[in-house]
Structures are given as C-alpha cells and as structure tokens.
Image (cartoon, coloured by chain):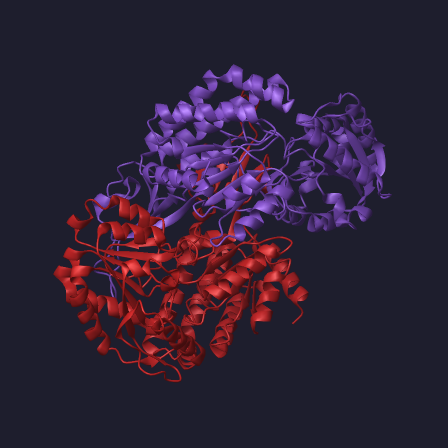
Chain colours: A red, B purple
Amino acid sequence: MNLDNLFNAAQEAFLFYKNISGREKSDFLTNLAEILEANRSEIVSLAVVESNLPDERINGELGRTVGQIRLFANLVKEGSWVEATVDPAMPDRTPLPRADIRRMLTPLGPVVVFGASNFPLAFSTAGGDTVSALAAGCPVIYKAHPAHPETSKKVADCIHQAISKSNLPQALFTHVEGGIAEGQALVKHPLAKAVAFTGSHTGGKALFDLANQREEPIPVFAEMGSVNPIFCFPQKLKNENDSLAKAFVGSLTLGVGQFCTNPGLIFVPKDQAAAFEKAIAEEMNDIASAPMLHPGIAEAYYNSLQFLQSREELRWVKVADAQHLINGSTALAEIKASDWLKDSVFQQEVFGAFAMMVVYESEAELQEIAKYLHGQLTITVWAESEELKNQLFLINLLEEKCGRLLFKGVPTGVEVGHAMQHGGPYPSTTDARSTSVGAYAIKRFARPIAFQDMPQELLPEALKDGNPLGIWRMVDGEYEK
Amino acid sequence: MNLDNLFNAAQEAFLFYKNISGREKSDFLTNLAEILEANRSEIVSLAVVESNLPDERINGELGRTVGQIRLFANLVKEGSWVEATVDPAMPDRTPLPRADIRRMLTPLGPVVVFGASNFPLAFSTAGGDTVSALAAGCPVIYKAHPAHPETSKKVADCIHQAISKSNLPQALFTHVEGGIAEGQALVKHPLAKAVAFTGSHTGGKALFDLANQREEPIPVFAEMGSVNPIFCFPQKLKNENDSLAKAFVGSLTLGVGQFCTNPGLIFVPKDQAAAFEKAIAEEMNDIASAPMLHPGIAEAYYNSLQFLQSREELRWVKVADAQHLINGSTALAEIKASDWLKDSVFQQEVFGAFAMMVVYESEAELQEIAKYLHGQLTITVWAESEELKNQLFLINLLEEKCGRLLFKGVPTGVEVGHAMQHGGPYPSTTDARSTSVGAYAIKRFARPIAFQDMPQELLPEALKDGNPLGIWRMVDGEYEK
C-alpha cells in the first residue's frame, strides 16, 4: 500500500472524526466491544495457537481488552477528560480588559501503534494503545506484530465492522503488516503525529530515536518493560517466608515470565536469605517449563542466562532446564548487594522466568541500591508497618525510580482503572509522564488548544456557554459542572 | 562550580522539598513575590539598561512576573493541580479483588531552566519556567542569559532571600553563568530531569537533540517562537481597514518585534490588499526605529532582511531604514500566495518588526496555505461572523497548526491565566502537549505515580482517606471535594 495514500486517508478521516461527539465515539467503541465479544471463540482460538498461551489466559485477556474498550467508551461519553478550562472575558478589567479564553484537549492526528507479542489482544490490534487513541479522536495506523498475524487480522476485521456499523470512515483504522522497515516507514511519515509501542528496549529506543530525528519530531510512548524489583524487609520475611516465596514465584512465572511487570529482581536481607531462597527454589520446582511466545524469545532467554552464567558474582540456586526449542523454564541466581552495585548489567531485564536475588546487609545498602536503580514500571516493598516507620527517605528514593509503588501483593495483574499508572522513568518507558494502562492513557494522544474570543457558534460543545455537555470544567480557576 | 556538587545539592534539596506542604511552597512563592516587589526600582533600573527596553515595559513585565508567581502560589496552596485519583480497594470483587490504587502527580527532580533575552524578567531568572518548576516541587538550576547578567544576579539574590526567609535549602535554586558550553553541560548532567527554554529555534532544537542523546533522555520544553499568522477575510477588512492596520502594526512592533507572538505573516484577500497595505505602510511611518535587545539581534534582523531582499518573489512596500548599530526599524514585503506556497523559507521567523503580507485569491488557496503552514504558537482569524459560517473545515485545519486560535484582537499580550495555552506544534515548541504560560505550565515538571495498597500513614496528604487537604479528587471515576 502506498504510504502517502494511507496517511492522507487517515488525515481526512481525522478531520471528520475529530468533530463527532463523545457520545458517537462512545457508541463506536461499544460496537467494537460487542463485536469482539461476538467473535470471542474464533479470536481466542487463533491467539492460543499463535501465542502458545493457554486458553484460559487468552480468554481472560480478551475480557480485559473488552473491559478497556468499555472504560474508554464511558470516559468519552462522560466527556470531562478534555480538561475544559474557561477564563471568561473581563471587558472592564483595568489597566487592560481580559479576552475570553477557553482551553481544551484536542486530538493529535493520525497515530502509529505497534502491537506487542506478549499480549496478542490487550496490547495489540484493539488493545489499550489503539483504543485510547481512537477514544482521544485519533485515527490509528496499526503495525501488526508478526508473531500473531492471523489473530491481528481477525481483530482488525472486527474493528472495520465496528467502523461500518457506526458509519465512520474506514481509514480511522489501518492494519499494516510487515517487519522493521515497514514500521520505521510509518514512524517517519510526515502525517504521523505520535507513536505508541510496547515491547523491547531495543525496539522502543530505536523508534524513539527515529521519531526525534524527523523534520518534525513527534512523541513516542514506548513501554519497554522493566525488572520490577521487590524490596523485602526482615520482619516481613520472618513472618511470611513461605507465602511470600509462593507469591513471588507465582508472579515471576506468570505468562512464562513474559509480562512487563514480572518481578525479576528481589532484595533480601542477609539473615533471611537462606530460608527465603530455599522456599523459592521449592516453589520453582513445582513450576513446569512451558512454551514461550515464539522460538526467538526462548532463544533470547537462554542466551541471556548463558551470558549471566559467565559472571562469577552470581551463585546459581536453580539453573534453567537445558534449552528446549521453545519452552522456558525457571531460574534463580543470588548475588551480594555489594557486587550487584558494581555493574549495571545485573539490572538488565531477562525476558522470561529468571529472578536475581540480591542479598543486602544494611539499610544504608538499601538506600545505595535505591539511588543506583534504573527506572522501573513498578517497585514493590514487602515490610511490616512498623518496619516502614523510619523509611520515608528510602520510600522517597524508590518513588523517584518507578511509576507504581506497591506495598502488598505482586506487580503482575495490572488493574485497568482510573488511578492506574503503567509507565515509569526511563528506561522503563520513553515518557514517564504518560501511562499505557488506565483512563489517563487517553491523554497521550491529545494536546491543549486555547480559543480566544471565538464566536459561541464555532466553539466546541465542551467549551460553550451553559456547559451543554454537562461536563466538569474549570471556570475562572474553580471546578464546576 | 563543580557540576556534580551542584546537582547533588539540588537533588538533596529536592528530596526535602518534595515533602513540604503546598501551603509551605505557597508561602515561599509569596515571599519571593514580595521580595521582588520590594526590590522593584533596582531590578527595573538594571533591566532597562541591559535590555534597551523602556522603563514602562520593564515595570509592566515585573508586574507580570510577580502576578505569575502569585498564580502559582495560589495553585499549590489550593492543591488540586496534582490530579489526585483514588480507586479504593474492592476486596470482595470477583473473580479477583481490586487493590487500593491512588495516583497523583509527583515532581520530576532538578530542572534546568534557560533564561530568554527578550523577557529579562517574565521568562528569565524568576520567570514562568523557574516558578512553575519550583511550584511543582522541582529545584531549579538556572542558566542566566548573558544579555542581562546584572538583572539576573539581582533577581537570583531575591530568590535566595526568599529561600532563606522560608527556611528552605539554598540549593533549591542555583544561578549559573556562562555560555553555550556551560548550558550544554547542565543539560547533560545525569541528575537533570527536564529542561525549559525560551529562545531561538537553533538554541531550542540543539538542547532538544542533546537531551534525547543522553543515556537517560529527558523532556525539553523549548518555546522557540513563531510567525503567528493572521488570516484576514474580505468583509472584515472592508469594514475595518484602518483600525485593523493599526492593530496589526501595533502588535507587530510591540517590543520592537521581539516577542514570540508578534504577527510576522498576514494573509490578505486580493481585492483588499492595496488598501490594507497602504494603511499598514502609513501606520509603519509613525513607528520610530528603536533599540533592539542587543547588537547581535539587530545584526541578525538586518541579515535576514537582506537575504529576503534577494528573493524576487517579494515586492517591498517598506524597506527597513539603513542598518543602525542596534536600532530595529519596521519593514513590509508583499508576496503572492502562489509564490509563498512554493518555498518554506518564506515561513521562517524574522525576529524583529518585519511583516510579510501574502495576497491570496480564493478560499481554496487559504486551505492550501493552512495545510502547508508550519506549527505556530498562535493563529489569528479576522473575519465577520457571517464570513465564518462555512469555514469549519478551514478552522479545523488551522487548529492543527497552533496552540492558540484568536478571533479578535492580536496575538501579543499573552494573558496569564488558567485557560492560557502558550505552546504549539513543532517548530513553535518541542512539546505541543505543554504550555509555558498559565497555570497548566506546572504540569510540565511532574509525572504521575500510583501507590498500591500503601499504608495510610505513608500516603501523601493529597491521597489520604478523608481528603485532609480538601482538594478536588477523582474517586472511582467521579470528581469530588
């Protein structure tokens, strides 16, 4: 397909679509949710085959995908997300009158979305990036992930059905197949206004660099994963050694360790290390190796382990089973904090069910770790309440390094809600000010515009006198509805 | 000064300052506003000498600077700007319970701010960038503009007095002098978390590239100016030829044409061009040439004009007075839209009181212009209401190209309020999703963080049960206070 034609059609669709009401956008998204549900069995069958993920997981992921779509459908129907802000004119102000100024968010334009291999539905064709962009008012040019081409085509077909049912331009969504070169060409096109990506650091950073080198640089929202460290305090481990080991291994091995939020790094106090390590190793013995997404991912996993095995700082508690064509198995290595602090290679993500246990000797060392740590999607603190009483400084340090800070449970299982933040400091993402999960994800695809002394009849509904949409607005600095 | 020491001190100050209350931040900013007012006469004297700008303008700019500080003082005292969002736990939800998730904005860390030559106060040492960063909770490393060193030192001294008065760490603000190399070193330091800049395209783009090439890329909020086109419709010009010419020349020549928002480009319908041009030329004759900010800026202005004078597409209505060491004079050239559309050199900003009048022949041509136009801070439409009835498509196109769209008055005189958007698509800024003027400017220096199952006693006040700060929060998707 000719890229200019593709983008020109998307731009034309954009200029139409940006003027339809939130209710119409909501109806379109609701249609999409219903069509996906109606095609559940076929979509799930395709995705199970193409991803090697179990039926139950894929069914759950489709449920989550549909849930996300309904969240955005509700958000744009309600309409307050546009941050309508009105400073009415003050014609009699001295020394100078004030003009009438009204601000709101407006969609960016056509957006390029890249699918993720590890979420063939929820972060792919009709996943969070696509749907939050469509909700914001942006057409999507979607680069399918080559790991699940048939699933992607099927879901794209559902999106086109929903577009038809809503009488919207088909160019609101374009499904593009291909490899790296095709993806790069999309990012380089002058009519592309933003990029969303979920995947590897290498891939995300390459797109970020490419987008910044354009004649008109554009934002890249790349979620590139992280190792999601867990900080364990002594009393907590003493009290809950076995259940925490079970929770840890469960979270580590969820999806064969192929989530962005699997905890691959755990900091354990010296006195508790032996008991905790033993419990983890036992839990790991119960986890059968399972197929990874595709052979390339399994190969990369074993290559990473092999590389780490050459490092004498690591003591291997459990080595992975011998490499299978595609199966991934658990692995666990231990390292002293003083060694871990010396080489950032020990912070690199190993995509798969490998965990590094770092044994620390003091709270001072924990603070050093926190300062040295790379940016993460999540950090988890496992501590009894009384152990945190004097840890405000450490907690502040950890806040600097993550987008979500947990004090209970595990980082996997990202809730899709209003308060979720799924995005953190670099290198976990290229834009810590954004989230790719939850309601705020829509804000990535919009920018503010202010209208000064615009005639009422030309103003968008969100900004008209009398607040015809009944949305929350800030008027003269005060919220009102 | 050793840069590591400087940034380490700023980082240490940050970890203290991020935990003080909005009220304390507000008191600090209010102290600063009062100290600046108390030093008004000395500050104004210095700035007048160093900027060549008249006393009245500098007095007004100090008033604006103090007004901005009070706006942010009120904003952080009120506290709702942090976007507190609470999704309470649902322990009984099936199939899975929901954790307690609470999100808010948290400051980025130490921020590097570059002063602007054309606003020695409002966009400089204690200007909007510095003050919105301090309001957000970020220490500022300020790179003084070499065009007004004594003014900058004096204002820095006021900031340090305010810090002392509020018993805050002095490293909340650091005044750095030097040239390009010193500025680049600040941007490259690993502890810098964002950059704000107001100035030339060359300068802003260089910092943007530098920041993206860091091991950890950081956001750059560069406001690089624009030509702020005015689109004139025939009936409006017929009705108000002389008053619009006067308004146009007044706005063009404000501050000797050295504002980011001077309108340097005006689109005029063919039939009205002669009369309007005559009126503009007459108005220009009344404008005496006046000193520009410094000789380098005057030289660049005359060099740009000389370059344009070699282009045969331009017909010169008024050439600038012969180059004076520092004075800038008005100039006006006319070009056919069909020629203007052929070379983007005609879109480049000439920093000074030069205007290009582009004569268009049809509405179709106006749409072509709108599509071809670079990103702008502002676009102004001068039209009678009835002339806009069928112009929704054109207005949509113009919206894509600016951050503020005006329908009356002139783009200069940027109101500092809640609804102001001062920032637009590239190349007018490097981040169209941000503003450098108005209350939303604070959001540039913060990012979201979510706390999951955080014990009440550790939660920031903004997120605690019972809403102790009494701020607007979104709870389960609904705003409440």
| Residue B361 image position (x, y, % from top left) | 81, 45
Above or below: residue B270 compared with residue A15: above
Closer to the camera in the image, B340 or A395: A395
Left of A278 or right of it: where is B377? right
Left or right: residue B336 versus residue B89 is right
The quadrant where residue A42 appears = bottom left
Q: Quadrant of residue B384?
A: top right
The spot of residue B69 in percent (x, y) is: 45, 28
Q: Is residue B45 above or below residue A310?
A: above
Q: Residue at x 38, y 30 (%)?
A: B170
Q: Please determine whether, in this image, residue A90 is positioned above or below residue B477.
A: above
Please name whichever residue, A473 or A279, is drawn nearer the observer in this view of the structure.
Answer: A279
Find residue B225 and report its horizontal and vertical position in percent: 63, 39
Residue, x 45% and y 70% (percent of image)?
A35
Q: Residue at x 48, y 72 (%)?
A: A155
Q: Is residue A426 visible?
A: yes
Q: Nearest the camera: A15 or A315?
A: A315
Q: Quadrant of the C terminus of chain B?
A: top left
Left or right of A325 on screen, residue B340: right
Is residue B476 visible in this depiction of the protein? no
Q: Residue furthest top?
A: B41
Residue B207, placed above or below residue B89 = above
Q: How many numbered discs?
A: 0
**Residue B385 in the image, given as x and y percentages of width and height:** 67, 37
Residue at far left of view: A239
